[in-house]
Image (cartoon, rainbow, N blue to C red):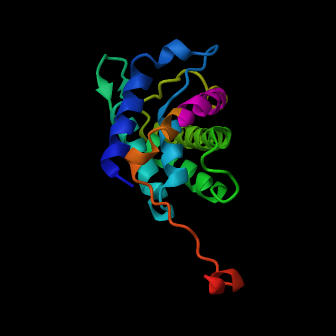
Amino acid sequence: MRWAVYILFTLIALAIDASFGGILKIGESQPRFLPCVVVFAILSAPRPYAVRIAMMAGLLADLLSPVLRSDGTQLVVLGPWTLGFALGSLAVVPLRTLLYRRNPISSGFATLVFSLLASVVFVAVWVLRMLLLRDETPSWWPGTGGGEVWRQAKVALVNGLVAVPTVWLLEKTRPLWGFSTAKRVIPGAARDLA
């Protein structure tokens, strides 16, 4: 896997999410393209890289999505998306053996699972931070954490729907990514004849 290509596509997805991702809003749910890129990479990259891939994207998401404080300043909190993407990747890695990796519908389902788990951790980290520090409130305040999980679950569903065409387009760029395509060698009588 070429890390430079992954970082480039991650930054492009973050830019789309931050700029004109709201055009595709379905109801109150704005889809995110970053989980689509991360799941595409996780499904094709070597297994040991899966959590690193996701955590790097989560770290970039944390760095580039500050929270506005009540006094107008910005607060960057490292951790909510980083840890959420790590848990999401730990759920998607076992799905690799069950799903056809190059099928966009399979990737849509994996993106749904990834986004749902990442958002649950995102909300849990913010609630824990709010309880411990008592000086910062999350962006959904004065709503509840449960309400935010419900809102993020709808976003995860929209992410899964958006992942189908996004992964189809990403499949067209597969040669750029440099994923290894090693074949499994099976011993047996057919191999002995060759």
Q: Answer above or below: position of 129 versus 16.
A: below
Name the residue at 47% across, 35% down: 34
Quadrant the N terminus occupies: bottom left
Q: Can see residue 81? A: yes
In the rendered structure, the answer to whether residue 74 lies left or right of residue 182 reads left
Q: Main secondary structure of the magenta part?
A: helix
In the rendered structure, the answer to whether residue 158 lies left or right of residue 135 reads right
Name the residue at 53% across, 23% down: 140
Task: Give percent across and percent down for residue 165.
Answer: 58, 29
Q: Can see residue 86? A: no
Task: Give percent across and percent down for residue 49.
Answer: 44, 59
Name the residue at 67% across, 43% down: 106
Is residue 145 within the magenta segment? no
Quadrant the C terminus occupies: bottom right
Task: Give percent across and percent down for residue 179.
Answer: 44, 55
Which residues, given as a range, are shown in magenta?
154-168
Question: Quick one: which residue is furthest to the front in this view?
Answer: 194
- All told, the count of numbered labels is 0
Is residue 163 within the magenta segment? yes
